[in-house]
Amino acid sequence: MASSRILGPPLRLPSSSGLARPAAALHCRAAAETATTLLRPHPQPHLPRTAVRHRSGPYGYTQAKALVYSNNGEPADVLKLHTHSISPSIPSTSVLVRCLAAPINPADVNTIQGTYGSKQPLTSLIGTAEPSAVPGNEGVFEVLSAGSPSSELKRGDWVIPAASQIGTWRTHAVFGADELLKVDKEGLTPTQVSLVSVNPCTAYRILRSYGPSAGVKAGLGMRPLEVGSGQWFIQNGANSGVGRAAIQFGKLWGLRSINVIRDRDTAEATDALKDELRGLGADVVVAESEFLSRGWKDRLAELTRKGREQVGLGLNCVGGKSATALARSLGDGATLVSYGGMAKQPVALPVGLLIFKDVRFVGFWLSRWNQQDVVGRRHMVADILGLMREGKFRDAPVDEVRWDWDTDEATLRNAAQRGLEGFRQGKGVYVFGDT
Ligand SMILES: NC(=O)c1ccc[n+]([C@@H]2O[C@H](COP(=O)([O-])OP(=O)(O)OC[C@H]3O[C@@H](n4cnc5c(N)ncnc54)[C@H](OP(=O)(O)O)[C@@H]3O)[C@@H](O)[C@H]2O)c1
């Protein structure tokens, strides 16, 4: 039975030995998975839990499970738990991995719904009756075996996806080594590492790259906010994974942040969330009711010393009215970076902001950045993991959903369905136990 809990103690994972019995000979992902995903019945729940060999199967086959979808729709309707076998024979360029933790991000839900900016290819590689895709863009895996003794990836290494949408919501997989990025796991939990590559990286890239206009003479480009300058940025969705990361990086890099959150059920709950974000390093936290009120203009003037310390950057996670108010809070030549659309409302912008304030509006998509700056991404991930290790970067609250071999489909599906819900206590993360 899966358990769900909020930010529990570090996960104790069973050792990988005995979970899978990959033999030395390895095989090719497409061919291997097609040829080897002869559906094998997985152990019935009443079988003794010590029956590890049921999951490694005869002849070194690894028994695996994956959430899959064949049609777009709501996760609760379209996700299925598919059981398959992975041959011990994988290609020399591949590795067999076991998933340790995999977050459920809003973008994963949008991908399943078919509303995301890119679509996953549907294939029959893992032997599903219909061509399907395995969702999940983020996660951390442990290497169980490598296809070649000369592979840079060794048994026991932890790896995260190097490519987008490789499908992390599964117990085991065979990936090309070039689809994975090895990380230094020292002192970190699987949940921490699983959450590094989307939200913190988004905040990191935006804060490091965007800012106010560099002026006409500089060819109308922009300059990032200056580290150590105390320059302001403003963001909505400030309690999101990206928002919490932006607060912390802003503090570490000597910037100041104005953070907008949605009002909670009670004033006490709103105050508690404000305190939580101040604890992360937020300079100002404002509830949406105040932010959208007439009084906000005066408060902002006070904060920015009547515009002498203008807000040079806005981060828009929400859209709709909130984004318009964000734009109105920006200083001359500032940039509003939209990276999310949680309210599912278009961004309406007063023309005056474009003409008279020369405010710039751009979008940000981490996947594109990752593709175009592979080395930069590697350094960024290592930098963020280092900050986590040193205790300088705090984890976002999570709602861990344990995934064992006998965890039922409905539990996993429903956890995915909750991924887009508002007012959550923590982000859903599948944490793999006895698989
Ligand atoms: N462009 C990119 O490269 C990129 C990268 C990462 C994330 N994103 C996007 O950023 C957004 C946030 O992702 P995340 O992983 O940081 O999310 P998250 O940690 O799950 O947090 C969700 C955030 O959205 C807010 N929210 C939920 N429903 C809302 C609604 N109906 N109206 C307004 N706010 C709502 C939540 O506020 P409450 O607590 O008040 O509900 C919370 O602040 C998503 O749209 C995601 O796709 C984009």
Image (cartoon, rainbow, N blue to C red):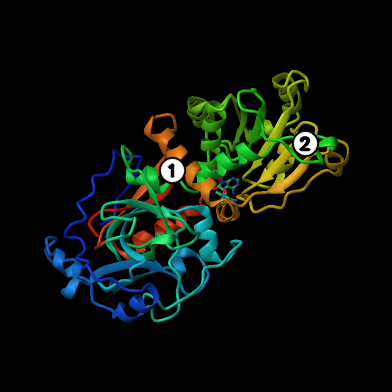
Q: What amino acid is found at the position of numbered circle 2 in the picture? A: Ser
Taking the view exactly as shown, the residue that stands out farthest to the front is 150
Give how far across and how far down residue 3 sits, in percent. 29, 51
Placement of 310 over or under 57, stated as above or below:
above
Mark 1 surroundings within 10 Å by alpha-carbon count, few (fewer than 14), some (14 through 19), many (20 or more): some
Q: What amino acid is found at the position of numbered circle 1 in the picture? A: Gly
Q: Which residue is mark 1?
A: 426
Quadrant assignment, res 435: bottom left
Give how far across and how far down residue 78 sits, in percent. 46, 70
Q: Is residue 209 visible?
A: yes
Give how far across and how far down residue 147 sits, in percent. 30, 66
Placement of 247 over or under 420, stated as above or below:
above
Question: Which part of the image, by quadrant, shows the N terminus?
Answer: bottom left
Determine the secondary structure under disc 2.
Answer: loop
Determine the secondary structure under disc 1.
Answer: loop
Q: Residue at x 65, y 28 (%)?
A: 226
Give how far across and how far down residue 404 sits, in percent. 26, 58
Mark found first going from the N terminus, 1 or 2? 2
Q: Residue at x 25, y 62 (%)?
A: 405
In the rendered view, does 250 fall on the left or right side of 306?
A: left
The answer to whether the beta carbon of the residue marked 1 is less than 8 Å from any atom of ligand 1 is no
Mark 2 surroundings within 10 Å by alpha-carbon count, few (fewer than 14), some (14 through 19), many (20 or more): many
Q: Which residue is mark 2?
A: 213
- Distance (Cα) linking label 1 and label 2: 36 Å
